[in-house]
Image (cartoon, grey):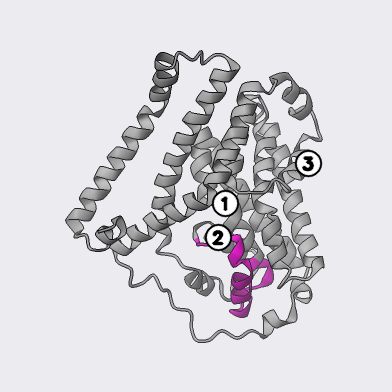
Amino acid sequence: MTVMERVHTATPMQRRAGLAVAAVAWWVLYAVNLPFWDWLLGDVAGLDLSTRLGSGIHFFLYDTTKILLLLTGIIFVVTVLRSFMSVERTRAILGGKRAGVGNVVAASLGVVTPFCSCSAVPAFIGFVAAGVPVGVTMSFLIASPLVNEVAIALLLGLFGWGPTLLYVAAGLVIAVVAGFVIGRLRPETWVEPFVFETTLGGEAVDPGYALTWNDRIQMGLEEVRDILKKIWPYLLVGIGIGAAIHGWAPERWFADHAGADNLLAVPLAVLLGVPLYSNAAGILPMVEALSDKGLPIGTLLAFMMATVALSLPETILLRRVLKPRLIAIFIAVVTVGIIAVGYLFNAVLPA
């Protein structure tokens, strides 16, 4: 019997016991991660961890283990919680909402609703066809990939609560403001006509209403497996680049060219982040290494947000429903928002 089959047939007592054992095992592994690699590399292998080579190897192995543990734990928890909220229920909540309040609600729901770049087109069509204003829909589409569980999990483990909450708040503000601005421009004429001609077959029904706890746990395990299967190459590449930056890149070079004193550092970070787009798992290890070199948090957040919010695959997909002028406005408004956040955080939270 597979793990998924055992979960599906577990009794409430077996489920609670299994979750408790898994939680304790996760906490033990996370707690011993750093001392284990210190002992294995320093004491057993005899590697000098203060050298560039030793520091780089330690960074790669320690961060790989830490990030995998964080992703496993937080993706599972977020998926179970998110099983109570579907795209259909979100669409029903947003239907008829006016600009302003609607943008705030849409951005907030975008954080907790399942969404990815591949679902951008059907989500946009479904929301607009259900009567959700275009500007409100854009707030949802911006917030959902920008403030995602992978980025939150990694930021929390790498930098703690402060930068993580700043990231979430900044992402929501960008989504709300960008959607509101786009909505004020009367963007309906810049949407492909077939979107408004689409009719929804029947009322939206939340498919999550009949889920049992065993179903939700199974969904969590499957989501962990699927996400890790998709991102592990990017994860290893990102951590490898981060290890190289951590061990070999000269700190003085970054301070001179990308420090808070360089007024062009933030827009350059945004421009660099767009073509580097992969996902948060591949970018955040690089962000951590750059932070160790003294780069200010605003520049780092701008770099990370550009890789996620200004996704080239999503932009290409959205062309099916948006005309080029609205896509250009979308990119311009989000870019200005990210740059403004970068400058603001550099001013109030210097490195």
Q: How busy is the neighbourhood of tag 1: few (under 14 within 10 Å), some, or many (20 plus)?
A: many
Q: Distance between the Cα atoms at labels 3 and 2?
A: 26 Å
Q: Of the numbered discs in the image, which one, if any, rests on residue 147?
A: 1
**Is most of the magenta stretch helix, strand or loop?**
helix
The residue drawn where x is 49% and y is 43% is: 153
Q: How many residues crowd around disc 2 within 10 Å: few (fewer than 14), some, or many (20 or more)? A: many
Dot placed on the residue nearer the N-terminal end, 1 or 3: 1
Residue at numbered disc 3: 267
Disc 2 to disc 1: CB gap under 8 Å: yes
Task: Locate the C terminus and report the quarter of the image it occupies.
Answer: top right
Looking at the rendered structure, the secondary structure element under dot 2 is helix
Residue 89 to residue 227: above or below: below
Q: Amino acid at mark 2?
A: Gly
Which residue corresponds to mark 2? 110
Q: Which residues fall within the magenta stretch?
A: 113-137
What's the distance in space between the residues labelled 1 and 3, CA to CA? 20 Å
Q: Is residue 124 magenta?
A: yes
Q: Position of residue 23 (x, y in %)?
A: 30, 43
Q: Nearer the viewer, residue 225 or 31?
A: 225
Nearer the N terminus, badge 2 or badge 1?
Answer: 2
The percent coordinates of residue 209 (x first, y second) are 36, 72
Q: Secondary structure at mark 1?
A: loop
What amino acid is labelled 3 in the image? Pro
- Residue appearing at x 53%, y 36% in the figure: 162
Q: Position of residue 171 (x, y in %)?
A: 62, 50
